[in-house]
């Protein structure tokens, strides 16, 4: 009876080792795909592909540039100049998350920024009138 349990345990360990190897290979593949997708050449290709596929090309370019810039700044704030691989990977994920969120909500962000700008301009105009 002990031998049967030992064999079962040995088999379970073997299965887990195989699973670990497969999962590690998948993670490496996803990481390499992620690194490839954030290369500047591929970002520019994606930008132009979205430009050509969108009827509102000018808005699309502005939205994408705004998304890329905010994603990049977010990554720089979080990761900085760190050489830690985990932090870099987390930074890439954050960068794309922020980029996607900004591009998806660009109209709301533009409206909000416009209202802030208008409030600042109107306050400045009021103070100039008073003086």
Image (tube, rainbow, N blue to C red):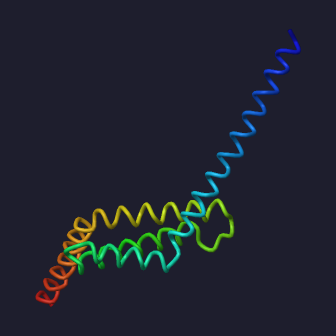
Outermost residue to the right: 3
Against 4, residue 67 (above or below) is below
Image position, residue 50 (x, y; %)? 32, 73
Q: Position of residue 72 (x, y in %)?
A: 47, 73
Return the residue found at the far top.
1
Residue at 66% from the left image edge and 52% from the top image edge: 25
Q: Position of residue 56 (x, y in %)?
A: 20, 75
Identify the residue at horizontal 17%, vertical 78% (top origin). Answer: 118
Query: Looking at the image, is 131 positioned above or below residue 12?
Result: below
Q: Quadrant of residue 128?
A: bottom left
Q: Residue furthest left?
A: 129
In this rendering, position of residue 53 left or right of residue 101: left
- Residue at 37% over, 76% down: 47
Residue nearest the observer in this picture, 49 or 100: 49
- Give the camera-side residue of 76 and 59: 59
- Tell whether 18 sits left or right of 57: right
* Camera-side residue of 72 and 29: 29
Query: The N terminus lies in which quarter of the figure?
Result: top right
User: Can you give x and y, in whole percent of width and height, for residue 64 in the image?
Assistant: 34, 74
State which quarter of the image contains the C terminus: bottom left
Q: Give the number of callouts.
A: 0
Q: Residue at x 35, y 61 (%)?
A: 101
């Amino acid at each position: 009876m002990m031998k049967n349990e030992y064999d079962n345990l040995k088999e379970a360990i073997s299965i887990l080792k195989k699973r670990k190897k497969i999962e590690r290979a998948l993670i490496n593949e996803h990481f390499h795909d992620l690194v490839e997708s954030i290369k500047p050449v591929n970002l520019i290709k994606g930008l132009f592909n979205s430009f050509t596929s969108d009827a509102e090309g000018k808005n699309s370019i502005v939205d994408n540039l705004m998304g890329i810039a905010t994603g990049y700044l977010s990554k720089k704030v979080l990761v900085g100049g760190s050489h830690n691989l985990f932090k870099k990977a987390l930074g890439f994920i954050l960068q794309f998350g922020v980029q996607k969120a900004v591009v998806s909500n660009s109209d709301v962000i533009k409206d909000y920024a416009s209202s802030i700008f208008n409030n600042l301009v109107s306050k400045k105009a009021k103070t100039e009138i008073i003086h």
